[in-house]
Amino acid sequence: MQLFKLEKCLLNVIFLATIIFFNTCDYAACLESAKKIKELGYPLMTYQVWTADKYLLGLERIPHSKHRNESIGKPVLLLHGLYLSSAIFTINNSSLSFVLSDAGFDVWLFNARGVGLSRKLSIYKKPGLQPKMNSISWDFSFHEMGVYDMTTAIDFILKSTGHSKLDVVGYSLGTTISLACLSDRPEYNSKINKLVLMAPTSRLKSSGMPINIFKQFSKIVNIFLDRINFFPYTNDPDTTYRLIRRMCTNQSAFKYCRQFIDFAQGIILPMNNDTILDIVSEFPQPMSSKTLKHMLQLLTSGRFGHYDYGPYGNMLHYHTKTAPDYDLSKITAPTYIIYSKNDSLVHPKDVKWLITQLPNIKDVHYIEKIPFGHFSFSLSPIMKEVVNMYITNKLLDNDLELQKSNII
């Protein structure tokens, strides 16, 4: 059975690879958060900000709901997952960014270095020119996304809004970024009102299919990743996405595009055709090989540790022969955990371990009785009822309590 699943995965990967490796960009051709936000009638603002280590980040913002033009509410920062960009939070009107906006929040959409708007700002010098993917250094992991990108975004948002704190919602890799940030830069805990970790990815000791495929072939995967700076490797991601979308509109090819998404999350997810086409129009985003190797280290070691440079490199970076674990006891921000029984990428056992490591857990939402895979958190037709309203209500709790006390 496992061999059959592996063969099926490889067929899908090969099928999409035939498009990925043949490519050339219309500056605004691919799916973006900005496009979806405008299509659905919400106000949009975009920003550019430099990190301390000289990476240019792009942030999208929905300052208020389209339903009422009122004063801007409390800021909330949304952090996307692996191979994704902020667009994952803007798929349709049930997506988290729009649910939070309608609830009165000032929604900020994060794009880590190298993906989404951050990538576009870095690789396009002028509209119409060919992109240069190696115009930025790809020597970074999720660690740098945490200690540099996330801290930069937080400081910029607080300065722009005048608030002293903001809420943070991380999804998948976005949770990993948050954990790295708040353990190595613990002073940022005081800048977070509430931290929501959705499908939290820390150690990967208990992960099952399909992620265990990479564990079984870790040596081969590492050799492959050592030869490239990022993956998927393409000179022009946006044209590639446009070609994939065009290819997937073909009826005979569509089933492979669908199977690719289903295999990636481990269960068959009810999705309409437009949603599938939107996903293949932006997934997978280019990801640095170092990030993928770091994730592979978590998978093979069963630990949640810093990047392992080997004994000599570790002595230079950490003054110890082994890469240290992230000190999760330093994450003191009020934390809310959401995870699912059917998530094949983030196993419940690993989430339960994480819960025991975090000192300020306020609530845990375990999705047990309905099929809900890893992508379901951002793509399921019932994501609004199952997770997005839960998040919204938890972030509104303080305001509701304050209103009650004022009435009394």
Image (tube, grey):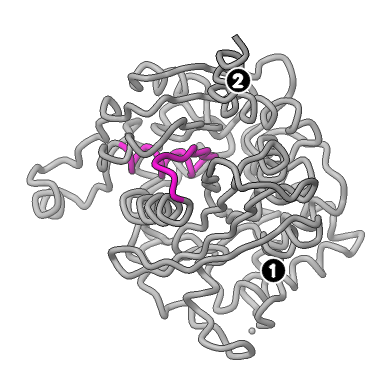
Mark 2 — residue? 403
Mark 1 — residue? 241
Do the residues under discs 1 and 2 have CB atoms within 8 angstroms? no
Q: What are the residue bounds of the magenta stretch? A: 162-182
Give whichever of 363, 353 is nearer the camera.
Answer: 363
Residue at the spot 82% in from the left edge and 70% down from the top edge: 246
Residue at the spot 64% in from the left edge and 30% down from the top edge: 392
Which percent across, then down, holds residue 162?
Answer: 44, 49
Label 2 Cα neighbours within 10 Å, binned few <14 / some 14-19 / many ≥20: few
Residue at the spot 66% in from the left edge and 39% down from the top edge: 104
Residue at the spot 27% in from the left edge and 48% down from the top edge: 307
Whether residue 180 appears in magenta in the rendering, the answer is: yes
- Counting residues from the start of the chain, the first of labels 1 and 2 encountered is 1
Does 143 appear above or below 325?
below
Does 73 appear above or below 232?
above
Give whichever of 182, 219 is nearer the camera.
Answer: 182
Q: Nearer the viewer, mark 1 or mark 2?
A: 2
In what quadrant of the picture does the N terminus appear? top right
Amino acid at the residue labelled 1: Tyr
Badge 2 element: helix
Which percent across, then down, holds residue 221?
Answer: 43, 54
Give whichever of 305, 359 is nearer the camera.
Answer: 359
Does 348 appear above or below 137?
above
> From the viewer's perspective, is 389 left or right of 363?
right
> From the viewer's perspective, is 286 left or right of 322?
right
Whether residue 11 appears in magenta in the rendering, the answer is: no
